[in-house]
Image (cartoon, rainbow, N blue to C red):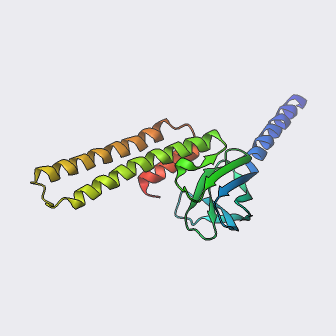
């Protein structure tokens, strides 16, 4: 009986330690160059139709800021300036995260986050942005073509090129979903496919 009690007590201790790690406060410290002094919001994003929830409000002073939140396991979060509708997304995979960005270069190519999972998120966003840009450029070529008739050979070539790029884009995302080892990254990629 004592042995059983010891095993149960040890199991409870392990579960509570795991529980504490999964339900922990995380902090994001950052430097956003060329940002005006203003409020910055830490928002939790959801993989549903639920609106983002503001968890913390910090203040940017000379580009520097700090915000913190409480996360139940890994999740998707965003920092957003009071004067902007868009923001920078990240995953709370570590208790202390560092952010570097520049208001004059808002694409993810120029954003730095201090964790391996966030580097993979950045890489995925940059790759999908590049493919979407190529799709938009191809769509503009189709729209600019003077003859919008499928019987026109050049128009057909442009449409076929667009279709091939779209298929490659979808295959890239599905392949990423199939091979990604991080649940939050997988859900983010799946959200692109489903439009959520």
**Residue extending furthest toward the right:** 2
Left or right, 77 with respect to 146, comes to: right
Task: Name the residue at 59% across, 42% down.
Answer: 119
Q: Quadrant of the N terminus?
A: top right
Task: Name the residue at 57% across, 47% down.
Answer: 184
| Image location (x, y in percent) of residue 51 | 57, 66
Q: Nearer the viewer, residue 84 or 15?
A: 84
Tally of numbered tags: 0
Left or right, 160 with respect to 81, comes to: left
Kindly tell me whether residue 111 is visible in this rendering. Answer: yes
**Residue extending furthest toward the left:** 151
Left or right, 23 with respect to 90, comes to: right
| Image location (x, y in percent) of residue 130 | 42, 47
Kindly tell me whether residue 76 is visible in this rendering. Answer: no
| Image location (x, y in percent) of residue 103 | 59, 59
| Image location (x, y in percent) of residue 101 | 62, 53
**Residue extending furthest toward the bottom:** 83
**Residue extending furthest toward the top:** 3
| Above or below, comparing residue 194 to residue 22 in the picture | below
Left or right, 83 with respect to 162, comes to: right
Task: Name the residue at 60% across, 64% down.
Answer: 52
Q: Nearer the viewer, residue 174 or 108?
A: 108
């Amino acid at each position: 009986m004592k042995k059983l009690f010891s095993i149960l007590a040890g199991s409870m201790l392990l579960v509570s330690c795991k529980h504490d790690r999964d339900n922990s406060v995380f902090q994001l410290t950052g430097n956003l160059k060329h940002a005006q002094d203003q409020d910055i919001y830490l928002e939790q994003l959801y993989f549903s139709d639920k609106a983002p929830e503001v968890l913390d409000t910090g203040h940017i002073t000379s580009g520097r800021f700090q915000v913190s939140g409480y996360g139940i396991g890994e999740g998707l979060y965003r920092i957003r300036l009071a004067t902007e509708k868009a923001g920078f997304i990240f995953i709370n995979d570590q208790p202390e995260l560092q952010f570097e960005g520049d208001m004059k270069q808002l694409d993810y190519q120029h954003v730095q986050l201090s964790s391996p999972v966030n580097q993979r998120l950045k890489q995925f966003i940059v790759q999908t942005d590049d493919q979407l840009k190529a799709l938009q450029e191809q769509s503009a070529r189709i729209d600019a073509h003077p003859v919008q008739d499928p019987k026109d050979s050049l128009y057909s070539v442009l449409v076929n090129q667009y279709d091939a790029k779209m298929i490659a884009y979808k295959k890239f995302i599905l392949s990423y979903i199939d091979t990604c080892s991080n649940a939050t990254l997988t859900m983010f990629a799946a959200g692109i496919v489903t439009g959520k």
